[in-house]
């Protein structure tokens, strides 16, 4: 806790951290120790991080159907354990941790291994963002990045996705993975170097 | 650090992978090097691309709580696969059911032959049953398909009739709107934003008379300017100018008949030529007393189920007199900190300012003042908050409804007051947060203490379960706190502010566990961020005039609205025009309101801005339209280029106008009020001036003397 954490990439989801009561108005924000609003917060947070969570699972499991099943499985696990929600410090980090475990269960399960289509059949590409007027060049770069993320080693992929999509701090990722923070940062660096190379194949290490 | 070192580190820096020392080095280099700052922007674009690549969209996936607790199967949103599974499984299920039924029909017999024959018969029967079941399935599915086809036909028919109905409705609405437009008399009054007392004022009345001729015959239209009830000006509107603008001028002489607090209205009415009966068609408030409303509640925070009492008081801002007429007021309690929300059910009260006193036995008597006049301007009432009202911030909104006797409302807009609703156990301890210093800046370490008291005695050895800090809306890690309170009931809390606090909105919350319950205390940390609001108010309120000494008041605040002391220079990029410093007094901290004033002569046609010397490190806004000096362009990359283009811009000076200053802050009774008027620009005539003080009925016309 004492170490300064990495600055978050985006603003954290409102309501995931206990905030002073003087903070921005959140009439629906739950108070710790109350049952029903906590449930709502869980469902709301899940739906808010939906794209990030399912995208992460798509990259980890290799296809969208399994990822959606794993996401629903993670949701039901969290739902069954919703009594503990008020004790959870960071709801988002918890959801991603449960989602990661659900993905691992999925990979271990014999039924899913058998029923999974061959990886070549299902080149996993999440739905494209439709931004009218977006440069085609950008879209092409995004496609190349997507193709580069999929084949990355599992460990690197998990670290990168938990940081990028889950917005977890490196400390939180290290805790989930039971690995030293230094290792996690090294894996993140490796992943970023690869992605930068995809975007800029000529300049080896440039800006 | 140089550019070769800096640029490869930028992506890692954006992802927070650098050591604090390395990161600080990169930040320092970025602040000084435009090339690397541009590279940083490019890297941020790369980060955006990576973020887009990592995240797809799954709009059809939703998470909803299971209907029943025991439902554990994951719900697959894609229906195609599941439907196929059921279709394949159904015949197998039928067959399995048949096979299971077979052993029950076989009757054991002694003879093997009989047994075989019976088995054959049973098998035949089973086959027949299976066939029948198959036919039944086919029949059911056939029927289902037919029903589906029927339903689709009906659906298509319904869609068609819906579209036809919609078309018909649109046609009727259009026809009705046209008819309404055709037979109407509309009157628009165009007037200046503020009516100038003592000067001639021009208005325009646009009349669109589309009524039938017989309806409009025998009547004529009159426009009148009224002060309270006296008619200052009456002007018939020429009927020949149908659909045209009618010009109305209120001469300067008319103002001699106007009392200072009179309400001025422009009334367009229709006069019947035979009966001389008047019908008011349009009434527009031109000027009049400005009212201010104070809205209060009996407490700042409530618990669900409690009673909320509120009271509003409306008075003339100058004379402190209530409005002359009755007001219809509506009070809404809306969710959220802004008045835009919908009021919760049952949390709306409407009433008039007709104040009554409810005596013993329910006797109601109107409240009268000493002169037996009704007491106006006060509205009060109560809400009973529902027991299931959600926690959060609410806003009490007061709006004035149109007066029952006609006439525009007195309040220009809604008046609001913030109300908090908090459930949970009531706090039983007194808690307080204190800070070691009056204010902190970016990158500094904050030393705070949280104090726990019970009935004015410190509570020692109470457990501190947590401390959370939030900087500009983002949580801050690295908050350390003492695990227990000391003998004074205090626990120290320490954390370091990030190096780049922009808005300075830092909040701290500390959680205690004492006496088996959790209680929290929260407060705003006094932090001056790198962003400031600096506002300029030219005296006279009418902007700056070029070439004339103008007095300008200045106010500096943080984005959160806290006053900040500033010192700086007014410059046009070539020379310093004035120095600016806010009023500060180290002994009287209450006097430090971030306010100051300065006098300078704006140059013609050149932008002028304020550069700050203190506080240091403030991010000033980029100036647009400011010419960059050639020297600064030549030395691009130096800090001078950046500093020459940022600052707090003053409003542009007008080339022509009058600047008015009052040199004496307070004028003693019996003394003349001295006013300096300075004019620049083209030659012209002086208009007469008028002094008007609140509740001071006399009025003097003053003619300016040159040089005074």
Image: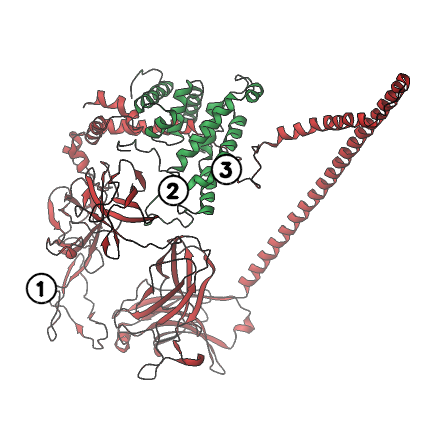
Chain colours: A green, B red
Instruction: Work out whether residue A95 or residue B294 is closer to the camera in this orientation and state it.
Output: A95
In this view, B674 is above or below A79: below
- Can the viewer see residue A45? yes
Check residue B707 in the rendering and tell me which mark sits there, or answer none.
1
Instruction: Work out whether residue A62 or residue A127 is closer to the camera in this orientation and state it.
Output: A62
Q: Chain of mark 1?
A: B
Which image quarter holds the C terminus of chain B?
Answer: bottom left
Label 1 CA crowd tier, 10 Å (few <14, some 14–19, many 20+): few
Where in the figure is residue A136, as x and y percent of width and height?
43, 26
Label 3 – label 1 distance at C-alpha: 85 Å
Q: According to the image, label 2 marks what residue?
A: A14
Label 3 CA crowd tier, 10 Å (few <14, some 14–19, many 20+): some
Q: Secondary structure at mark 1?
A: loop
Which image quarter holds the N terminus of chain B?
Answer: top left
Could you tell me how many numbered marks the image carries?
Answer: 3
Instruction: Work out whether residue B627 or residue B242 is closer to the camera in this orientation and state it.
Output: B627
């Amino acid at each position: 806790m004492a170490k300064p954490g990495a600055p978050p990439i985006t603003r954290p989801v409102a309501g995931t951290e206990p905030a002073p009561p003087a903070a921005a108005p959140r009439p629906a924000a739950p108070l710790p120790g109350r049952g029903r609003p906590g449930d709502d917060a869980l469902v709301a947070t899940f739906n808010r991080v939906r794209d990030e969570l399912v995208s992460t699972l798509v990259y980890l499991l290799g296809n969208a159907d399994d990822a959606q099943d794993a996401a629903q499985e993670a949701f039901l696990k969290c739902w069954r354990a919703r009594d503990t929600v008020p004790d959870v410090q960071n709801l988002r980090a918890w959801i991603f941790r449960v989602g990661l475990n659900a993905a691992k269960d999925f990979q271990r399960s014999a039924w899913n291994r058998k029923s999974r289509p061959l990886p070549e059949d299902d080149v996993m590409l999440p739905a494209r963002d439709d931004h009218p007027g977006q440069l085609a060049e950008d879209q092409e770069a995004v496609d190349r990045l997507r193709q580069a993320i999929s084949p990355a080693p599992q460990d690197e992929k998990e670290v990168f996705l938990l940081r990028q999509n889950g917005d977890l701090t490196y400390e939180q990722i290290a805790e989930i993975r039971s690995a030293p923070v230094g290792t996690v940062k090294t894996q993140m660096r490796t992943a970023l170097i690869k992605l930068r190379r995809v975007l800029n194949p000529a300049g080896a290490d440039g800006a | 650090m140089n550019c070769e070192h800096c640029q490869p580190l930028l992506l890692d820096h954006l992802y927070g992978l650098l050591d604090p020392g390395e990161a600080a080095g990169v930040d320092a280099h970025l602040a000084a090097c435009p090339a690397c700052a541009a590279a940083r922007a490019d890297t941020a674009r790369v980060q955006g691309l990576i973020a887009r690549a990592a995240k797809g969209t799954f709009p059809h996936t939703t998470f909803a709580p299971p209907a029943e607790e025991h439902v554990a199967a994951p719900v697959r949103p894609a229906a195609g696969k599941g439907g196929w599974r059921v279709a394949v499984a159904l015949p197998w299920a039928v067959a399995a059911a048949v096979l299971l039924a077979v052993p029950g029909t076989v009757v054991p017999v002694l003879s093997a032959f009989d047994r075989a024959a019976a088995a054959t018969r049973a098998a035949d029967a089973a086959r027949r049953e299976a066939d029948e079941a198959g036919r039944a399935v086919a029949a059911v599915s056939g029927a289902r398909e037919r029903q589906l086809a029927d339903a689709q036909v009906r659906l298509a028919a319904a869609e068609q009739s819906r579209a036809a109905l919609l078309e018909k409705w649109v046609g009727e609405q259009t026809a009705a709107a046209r008819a309404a437009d055709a037979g109407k008399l509309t009157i628009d009054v165009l007037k200046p934003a503020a009516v100038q007392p003592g000067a001639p004022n021009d208005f325009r009345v646009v009349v669109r008379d589309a009524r039938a001729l017989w309806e409009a015959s025998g009547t004529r239209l009159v426009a009148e300017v009224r002060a309270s009830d006296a008619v200052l000006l009456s002007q018939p509107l020429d009927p020949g100018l149908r659909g045209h603008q009618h010009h109305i001028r209120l001469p300067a002489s008319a103002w001699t008949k106007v009392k200072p607090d009179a309400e001025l209205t422009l009334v367009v009415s229709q006069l019947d030529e035979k009966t001389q009966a008047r019908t008011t068609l349009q009434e527009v408030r031109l000027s009049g007393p400005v009212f201010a409303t104070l809205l209060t509640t009996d407490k700042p925070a409530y618990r669900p189920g409690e009673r909320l009492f509120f009271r509003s008081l409306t008075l003339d801002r100058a004379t402190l007199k209530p409005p002359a007429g009755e007001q219809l007021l509506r009070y809404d309690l809306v969710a959220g900190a802004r008045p835009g929300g919908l009021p919760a059910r049952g949390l709306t009260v409407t009433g008039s300012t007709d104040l009554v006193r409810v005596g013993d036995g329910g006797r109601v008597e109107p409240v009268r003042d000493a002169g037996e006049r009704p007491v106006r301007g006060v509205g009060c009432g109560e809400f009973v908050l529902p027991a299931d009202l959600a926690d959060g911030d609410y806003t009490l909104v007061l709006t004035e409804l149109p007066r029952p006797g006609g006439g525009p409302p007195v309040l220009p807009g809604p008046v609001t007051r913030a109300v908090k609703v908090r459930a949970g156990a009531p706090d039983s301890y007194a808690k307080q947060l204190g800070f070691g210093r009056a204010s902190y800046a970016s990158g500094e370490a904050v030393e705070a203490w949280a104090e726990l008291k019970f009935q004015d005695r410190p509570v020692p050895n109470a457990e501190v379960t947590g401390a959370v800090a939030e900087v500009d809306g983002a949580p801050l890690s690295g908050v350390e706190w003492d695990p227990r309170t000391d003998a004074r009931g205090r626990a120290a809390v320490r954390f370091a502010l990030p190096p780049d606090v922009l808005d300075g909105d830092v909040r701290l919350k500390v959680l205690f566990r004492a006496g088996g319950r959790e209680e929290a205390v929260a407060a705003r940390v006094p932090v001056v961020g790198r962003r400031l609001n600096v506002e300029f108010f030219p005296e006279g309120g009418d902007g700056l005039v070029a070439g004339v000494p103008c007095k300008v008041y200045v106010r500096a605040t943080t984005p959160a609205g806290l006053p900040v002391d500033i010192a700086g220079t007014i410059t046009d990029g070539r020379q310093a025009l004035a120095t600016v410093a806010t009023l500060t007094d180290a002994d009287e901290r209450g006097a430090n309101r971030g306010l100051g004033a300065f006098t300078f002569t704006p140059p013609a046609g050149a932008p002028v801005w304020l550069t700050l010397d203190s506080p240091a490190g403030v991010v000033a806004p980029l100036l647009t339209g400011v010419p960059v000096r050639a020297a600064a362009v030549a030395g691009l990359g130096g800090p001078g280029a950046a500093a020459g283009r940022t600052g707090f811009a003053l409003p542009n000076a007008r080339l022509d106008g009058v600047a008015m200053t009052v040199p004496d802050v307070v004028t003693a009774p019996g003394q003349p009020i001295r006013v300096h008027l300075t004019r620049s620009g083209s030659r012209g005539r002086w208009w007469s001036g008028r002094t008007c003080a609140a509740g001071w009925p006399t009025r003097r016309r003053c003619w300016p003397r040159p040089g005074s």
